[in-house]
Image (spheres, rainbow, N blue to C red):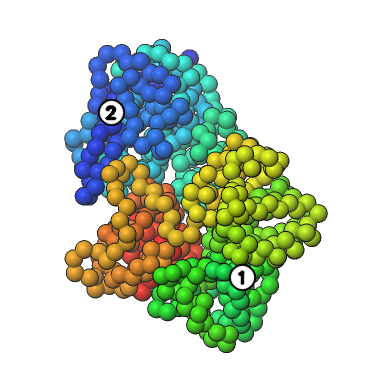
């Protein structure tokens, strides 16, 4: 077979802690060339390692490849003459194997070993950190030069100078550059998405992302209205010893939310978000609120709000929603976590009564069991409805043994809402029973996604150090904090306040940082390669242009 290229350098490096912007990053992106032959095994090149196995490494990402021709491209682009092999964190620096020629599923023999192409490089801030150019993750995508990962088909020794021979062509001939663009750039073609999910060699994470894109609506739905609008309170009703419902209406029927979404309300000088708990098609809204001892808004809603009053409300939002389908549904909740799954139960009873529905709820006791009669009535009307309740005061809990004894259908989709520990334990137990499609909703701040950051302490959100900014006000609703903006990005501002954040590339590519904008406007600088959806911001590059309310 003709030569496809040549291995110029084998580069390895073990993870180490690196100081970065006042924090510590554990990373293996620093690679150095090695002399002589190196053994390549299923998970690694001997002497190599990765600091963040969630985004790098593992069987499907054992070896990272980058090309000499891309080195030359970036040398000219940045005016750099100091680039050494391994500078892009790659294990193999090669001559040839261009990203717009190599295809997912292609196999190559190098030395004694054989490899299969599994995915493009993951966009990650650490390659920019290593290179000294923070925008590099976005540029790798925009210039269609990401590099790619290999899976080890046959272990063996490799060395610089080895010829690279292609031994098999991947299904559908989808190039690395086109695969990368499908995930990160706009204007993606559905036929290429369908081809991508039909490539067995493509790594499971990228398969899952492409399936989600295929299942997503052609155009993201805009929020039903911008900012806050006033709705009329038509009733306040006790549901249990600690839960009350607030009924809301407008002059005309209110836009239907998706079952499982929430509202953000402004009251008592603060903002809080509460799940909708009624039938989405009712034309009115109902939020159900647990009274917290020190809760400013919950105490106001429980004790001072009266029918006839007006309440400032942002449009329904949230991604924890009932998905279409005919498979069984598990609605699993604890305490006030009942509210979004109750809306789902209403939707199933009214519009999908033939689906098999399992209602599993945990409460302290009967006095704290909100919506017991309402849920029971809805389930009784379903021909395939099942109900199981646990009262913890009596020692009953949704243990793995309890779940195993219920005979739950393995092909079900499970929706979990409740305390974090409850969802983790129940989700793990469901997984052992064959229920792998588990979706969760967590009230309050979401867990941070800060890849590679080590030694970070959990600090309650607070005003940023130093003098307050002179810009618009920024409210982080989930963190119950309002600050003044300065010249930093919203991500940098949130980090200065110890608001939990989610990010990976920090350059507007990966959309890990996408955040709902409840009110206000932003500008993005640098502009993202693919804009966020309506009513959203990529906080890694966004800055406020007016007073802003973020669901963060």
Image location of residue 418, percent across then percent down = 53, 55
Image location of residue 497, percent across then percent down = 29, 61
Residue in view at x 31 percent, y 73 percent: 472
Residue in view at x 46 percent, y 68 percent: 292
Is 206 situated left or right of 545 in this image?
right
- Where disc 1 sits, the SS reads loop
Q: Residues within 10 Å of mark 1 (few under 14, many from 20)?
A: some
Are discs 2 and 1 less than 8 Å apart at CB?
no
331 shown above or below 226:
above
Q: Residues within 10 Å of mark 2 (few under 14, many from 20)?
A: some
Is 550 situated left or right of 339 in this image?
left
The residue labelled by disc 2 is 14
Residue in view at x 55 percent, y 65 percent: 275
Foreground residue, 286 or 16? 286
Quadrant in the picture for residue 484: bottom left
Foreground residue, 376 or 383? 376
Q: Can residue 325 be seen in this snapshot?
A: no
The residue labelled by disc 1 is 239
Query: Which quarter of the rendering shows the C terminus?
Result: bottom left
């Amino acid at each position: 077979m003709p030569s496809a290229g040549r291995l110029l350098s084998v580069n390895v490096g073990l993870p180490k802690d690196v100081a970065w912007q006042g924090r510590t990053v554990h990373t293996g992106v620093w690679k150095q060339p090695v002399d002589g032959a190196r053994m390549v095994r299923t998970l690694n090149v001997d002497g190599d390692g990765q600091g963040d196995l969630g985004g790098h490494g593992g069987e499907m990402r054992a070896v990272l490849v980058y090309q000499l021709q891309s080195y030359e491209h970036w040398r000219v682009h940045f005016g750099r003459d100091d680039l050494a092999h391994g500078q892009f964190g790659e294990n193999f620096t090669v001559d040839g194997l261009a990203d717009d020629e190599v295809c997912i599923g292609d196999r190559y023999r190098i030395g004694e070993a054989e490899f299969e192409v599994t995915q493009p490089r993951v966009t990650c801030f650490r390659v920019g950190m290593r290179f000294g150019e923070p925008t590099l993750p976005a540029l790798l995508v925009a210039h269609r030069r990401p590099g790619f990962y290999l899976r080890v088909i046959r272990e063996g020794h490799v060395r610089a100078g080895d010829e690279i021979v292609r031994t098999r062509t991947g299904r559908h001939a989808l190039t690395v550059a086109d695969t990368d663009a499908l995930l990160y750039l706009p204007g993606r073609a559905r036929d290429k998405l369908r081809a991508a999910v039909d490539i067995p060699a493509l790594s499971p994470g990228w398969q899952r992302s492409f399936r989600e894109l295929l299942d997503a609506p052609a155009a993201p739905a805009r929020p039903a209205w911008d900012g806050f609008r006033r709705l009329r309170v038509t009733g306040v009703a006790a549901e249990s010893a600690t839960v009350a419902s607030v009924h809301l209406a407008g002059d005309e029927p209110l836009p239907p939310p998706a079952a499982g979404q929430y509202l953000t309300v402004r009251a008592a000088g603060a903002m809080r978000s509460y799940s909708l708990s009624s039938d989405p098609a009712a034309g009115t809204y109902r939020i159900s609120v647990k009274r917290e001892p020190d809760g400013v808004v919950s105490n106001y809603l429980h004790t001072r709000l009266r029918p006839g009053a007006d309440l400032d409300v942002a449009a329904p939002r949230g991604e924890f929603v009932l998905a279409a389908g005919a498979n069984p549904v598990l609605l699993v909740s604890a305490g006030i976590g009942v509210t979004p799954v109750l809306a789902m139960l209403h939707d199933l009873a009214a519009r999908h009564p033939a689906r098999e529905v399992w209602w599993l709820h945990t409460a302290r006791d009967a006095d704290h069991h909100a919506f017991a009669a309402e849920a029971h009535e809805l389930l009784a009307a379903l021909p395939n409805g099942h109900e199981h309740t646990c009262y913890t005061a009596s020692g009953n809990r949704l243990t793995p043994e309890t779940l195993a004894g219920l005979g739950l259908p393995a092909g079900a989709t499970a929706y979990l809402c409740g305390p974090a520990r409850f969802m983790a334990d129940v989700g793990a137990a469901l997984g052992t029973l064959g229920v792998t499609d588990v979706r969760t909703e967590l009230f309050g701040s979401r867990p941070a996604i800060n890849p590679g950051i080590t030694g970070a302490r959990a600090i309650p959100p607070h005003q940023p150090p130093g003098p307050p900014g002179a810009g618009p006000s920024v409210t982080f609703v989930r963190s119950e904090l309002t600050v003044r903006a300065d010249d930093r990005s919203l991500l940098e501002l949130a980090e200065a306040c110890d608001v939990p954040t989610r990010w990976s590339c920090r350059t507007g590519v990966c959309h890990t940082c996408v955040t709902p904008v409840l009110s206000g406007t932003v500008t993005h600088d640098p502009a993202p390669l693919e804009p966020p959806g309506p009513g959203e911001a990529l906080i890694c590059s966004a800055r406020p242009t007016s007073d802003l309310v973020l669901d963060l």
